[in-house]
Amino acid sequence: MDRPKIVRYEKPGKVENYPCGAIRVGTLVQDNAGWRILKPVIDHGKCVMCLRCFLLCPDGVIDKSGKILEIDYRFCKGCGICARECKVEAIEMVREGGDEDAG
Ligand code: SF4
Ligand code: SF4
């Protein structure tokens, strides 16, 4: 049996070439069940479009196809990974239905 070949790791030059972030917006078939209590809100004035949140969102609900990032709240589960990982603190987790709920 052939042994697996070792492939030298080359850092991808483009975000699209990273192995994660493969789940695209629109591929989840079940929306969230309404138990989310916090939701991420992006401050587009602070966002530097590094796409770290896009790559790390486990549900692939951050859409980067437009000029600004958009979160599909139908499927976002409110885990907060995007907010935690954003290096410029451009994502705030806000309470659903609260005064600060901007959208
Ligand atoms: S991680 Fe933060 S700065 Fe980077 S794209 Fe997401 S919101 Fe923008
Ligand atoms: S809160 Fe979780 S599921 Fe929602 S956009 Fe952020 S990382 Fe994705």
Image: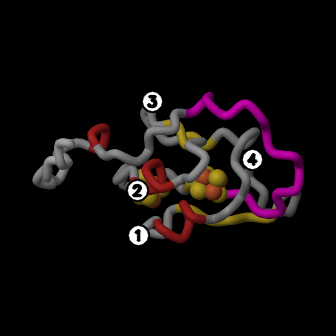
Residues at circles 1 and 2 in contact by the CB criterion of under 8 Å? yes
Rendering quarter of residue 43 = bottom right
Nearer the N terminus, badge 4 or badge 2?
Answer: 2
Q: Quadrant of ligand 1?
A: bottom left
Q: Secondary structure at mark 4?
A: loop
Task: Specify whether residue 102 is painted magenta.
Answer: no
Q: What label does residue 68 carry, if any? A: none
Q: Residues within 10 Å of mark 4 (few under 14, many from 20)?
A: few
Q: Residues within 10 Å of mark 3 (few under 14, many from 20)?
A: few
Magenta span: chief secondary structure: loop
Q: Residues within 10 Å of mark 2 (few under 14, many from 20)?
A: some
- Residue bearing the label numbered 4: 103
Q: Which residues are magenta?
A: 25-41
Residues at circles 4 and 1 in contact by the CB criterion of under 8 Å? no
Nearer the N terminus, badge 3 or badge 4?
Answer: 3
Rendering quarter of residue 25 = top right
Q: Nearer the viewer, mark 4 or mark 2?
A: 2
Q: Which residue appears at 76% of the width and 39% of the height?
A: 74
Q: What label does residue 65 carry, if any? A: 3
Task: Give percent across and percent down for residue 50.
Answer: 34, 53
Q: Secondary structure at mark 2?
A: helix
For the residues labelled 4 and 1, the Cα–Cα distance comes to 23 Å
Q: Residues within 10 Å of mark 1 (few under 14, many from 20)?
A: some
Task: Give percent across and percent down for residue 5.
Answer: 14, 47
Q: Secondary structure at mark 3?
A: loop
Q: Which residue appears at 47% of the width and 48% of the height?
A: 54
Nearer the N terminus, badge 4 or badge 1?
Answer: 1
Nearer the N terminus, badge 2 or badge 3?
Answer: 2
Q: What label does residue 52 carry, if any? A: 2
For the residues labelled 1 and 3, the Cα–Cα distance comes to 21 Å
For the residues labelled 4 and 2, the Cα–Cα distance comes to 22 Å
Q: Is ligand 1 closer than 8 angstroms to the Cβ of mark 2?
A: yes
